[in-house]
Image (cartoon, rainbow, N blue to C red):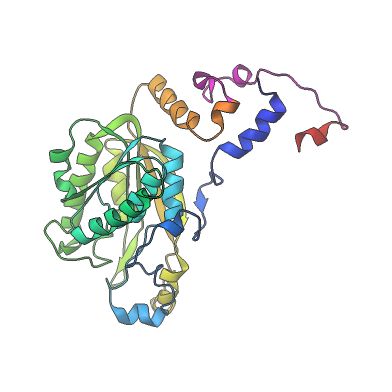
Amino acid sequence: MTDYIERLRKQGLYELSYEPKSYWEYSRGNNIDKLVNDIKSYDYNAEKTHEDFIKSGRGSFLSKFNSEYAKRIIEMWSKEDDFIVDPFAGRSSRPLVSTLLGRNYVGFDVIKNNLQEAEEQYNVLKKERSLGKLKLIHNSSEDIDKHLHGDVADMIMTCPPYYNIEKYESVDGQLTDIKTYEEFLETYKIILEKSIKILKPSCFFVVVLANFRIDGKLYDFCSDTKNILKEHLTFHDEIILEMSPAKRHALYTQAIVNLNCLKTHEYCLVFRKKDDKNNMIKKNNDINYNRPLVKDIHPNKDRLFWVDKKDWIDEKFNTSTNSLDKFF
């Protein structure tokens, strides 16, 4: 049995690759980020000036889902071999990060080129390393119930289109082509509710999104999403995500002229599907027990975190002014 001091030391190493606080600072250049290329994103074209960004027109450069944020979300609310479903797969970030972390990923998108780009990168990476399984479906997630039946997903992770803020390719099922925000919400609600139905009890539904302005009007997309999900799920957590500086620098002048603050953050909204308390405890332990080094620290996953402290701290220890150096 590892002694208590050594257990504490290891515990500081295993838990997460980041501090689990409610504000995440923007990060690029980690090992996973270097493997995930998104040639259409503004981040990928960082050498472009903000004037290039403005002149290019909406839709020429698209925002990239930050791979570090994807990594943190996946680490926190899922475990290896879990089945992640994404109703708005987009391009390469979430599919590749999920599979690089040993999760199995199923994503829906109406733009065929996006899915092909992600699949091509996946096939290249698969030659060099072990990956989770990948299934990309060229179809609107309005039809998600035609492909997946029953509560099969261990996690729903997605980032929906922000109405028509970014202009994507016009194809059948494209939400950004919908004319009014109210009509957009109607279709969006159908997709969310169908996604909820395939989520297993005790599991997490994670959506990254932001409020936005159109012609000076602020749209409270986050509250609209919360209201839809709260009808069916428990609101579990909320994290503020710092946006890429590349995306916001181009809009400084516009914000000053219009006398509104520049939006520099998004939200990560976390919901959980209701279940019996004991099953939810078991789910927590299953996720935590599969983190690196946990098995060395906690020999029994049934006695992990949701128990009295005395149940998992077996060793007693005494401290004095002369023995504090043992902790470091």
- Main secondary structure type of the part rendered in magenta: loop
Q: Based on the displayed image, in which of its 4 quarters is residue 257 positioned? A: bottom left
Regarding residue 208, the answer to whether it shows in the image is no
Q: Nearer the viewer, residue 267 or 215?
A: 267
Question: Which residue is situated farthest in the front direction here?
Answer: 127
Vertical relation: 271 (above or below) 179: above
Residue drawn at x 28%, y 66% as measured from the top left: 165
Q: Based on the displayed image, in which of its 4 quarters is residue 309 positioned? A: top right
**The magenta stretch spans residue 278:** no
The stretch in magenta equals: 298-321
Point out residue 233 in the picture as x, y percentages from the top left corner. Answer: 31, 35
Regarding residue 243, the answer to whether it shows in the image is yes
**The magenta stretch spans residue 304:** yes
Count of numbered circles in the view: 0
Q: Is 49 on the left or on the right of 56, as rendered?
A: right
Point out residue 140 in the picture as x, y percentages from the top left corner. Answer: 16, 51
Which quadrant is home to the N terminus?
A: top right
Residue drawn at x 17%, y 59% as measured from the top left: 174
Point out residue 117 in the picture as x, y percentages from the top left corner. Answer: 27, 59
Vertical relation: 262 (above or below) 156: below
Residue drawn at x 39%, y 40% as measured from the top left: 102
Q: Nearer the viewer, residue 273 or 135?
A: 135
Point out residue 326 in the picture as x, y percentages from the top left corner. Answer: 79, 33
Q: Is 282 on the left or on the right of 84, as rendered?
A: right
Vertical relation: 266 (above or below) 80: below
Which quadrant is home to the C terminus?
A: top right
